[in-house]
Image: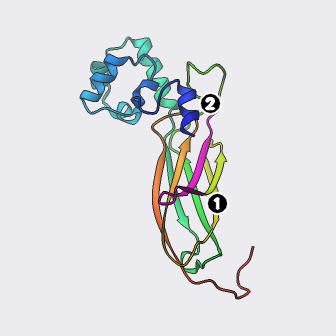
């Protein structure tokens, strides 16, 4: 997933996220990071005058930056582990995820070095960082809103910690992660489970 971001934006994941922005060279990025401005969201939150003074770009260059910022995804994510009190070893764990785009602009990804037009794609992943294992994964495209459900099989009884990842395949710096835990009860052999 990170590789797709790097290929699309023609940069390394260790590079400043600001490198994705049009006309942002090393000097501009250094000026920004010296002022504590390190993400695309930080650029958007600046007052217009402060942004102009910091970036020192022409009007047409600023228009390119504004176009990128307007297209850069700002997505609210909420999630819920369903039937959290009834999870037993071997049963299915269901995690409902709701996504809502804050902005209405959509269209192809702004990636000047990518050789063709490319649409945004997203991954929603549940992983266990301790064992470095992937439990559930779904790929989606997101226009305005989406609801999805991820499932995985409950492990052995006890307390288990997981991470929910929401990752772009096109932009760096807009990925999200949320930690959650479940308490798994002993295996139940009653006929109450359904597949």
Residue found at x 48% / y 57%:
129
Whether residue 36 is situated above or below residue 111 in the rendered picture = below
Characterize the local packing of mark 1: few (<14), some (14-19) or many (20 or more) Cα atoms within 10 angstroms.
some
- Image: magenta residue range: 119-134
In which quadrant of the rendered image does the C terminus lie? bottom right
Identify the element where label 1 is drawn.
strand
At which x and y percent is residue 188? 65, 85
Whether residue 184 is situated above or below residue 191 in the rendered picture = above
> Mark 2 or mark 1, which is nearer the start of the sequence?
2
139 and 158: which is toward the camera: 158
Residue assigned mark 1? 149
Whether residue 104 is situated above or below residue 56 in the rendered picture = below
**Position of residue 135 in the picture relative to residue 132 (left or right):** right
Give the residue at the far bottom of this rendering. 190
Q: Is residue 125 magenta?
A: yes
130 and 159: which is toward the camera: 130
At which x and y percent is residue 81? 55, 68
Give the residue at the far front of this rendering. 131
Residue assigned mark 2? 107
């Amino acid at each position: 997933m990170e590789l797709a971001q790097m290929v699309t934006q023609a940069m390394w994941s260790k590079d400043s996220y600001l490198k994705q922005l049009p006309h942002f060279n090393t000097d501009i990025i250094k000026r920004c990071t010296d002022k504590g401005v390190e993400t695309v969201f930080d650029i958007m939150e600046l007052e217009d005058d402060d942004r102009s003074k910091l970036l020192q770009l022409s009007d047409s260059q600023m228009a390119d930056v504004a176009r990128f910022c307007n297209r850069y995804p700002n997505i609210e994510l909420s999630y819920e582990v369903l039937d959290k009190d009834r999870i037993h070893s071997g049963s299915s764990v269901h995690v409902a995820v709701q996504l809502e785009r804050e902005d209405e602009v959509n269209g192809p990804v702004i990636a000047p070095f990518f050789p063709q037009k490319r649409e945004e794609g997203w991954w929603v992943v549940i992983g266990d960082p301790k064992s470095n294992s992937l439990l559930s994964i779904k790929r989606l495209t997101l226009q305005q809103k989406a609801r999805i459900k991820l499932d995985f099989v409950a492990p052995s009884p006890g307390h288990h910690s997981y991470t929910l990842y929401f990752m772009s395949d096109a932009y760096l710096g807009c990925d999200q992660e949320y930690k959650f835990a479940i308490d798994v009860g002993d295996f139940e052999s009653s006929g109450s489970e359904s597949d």
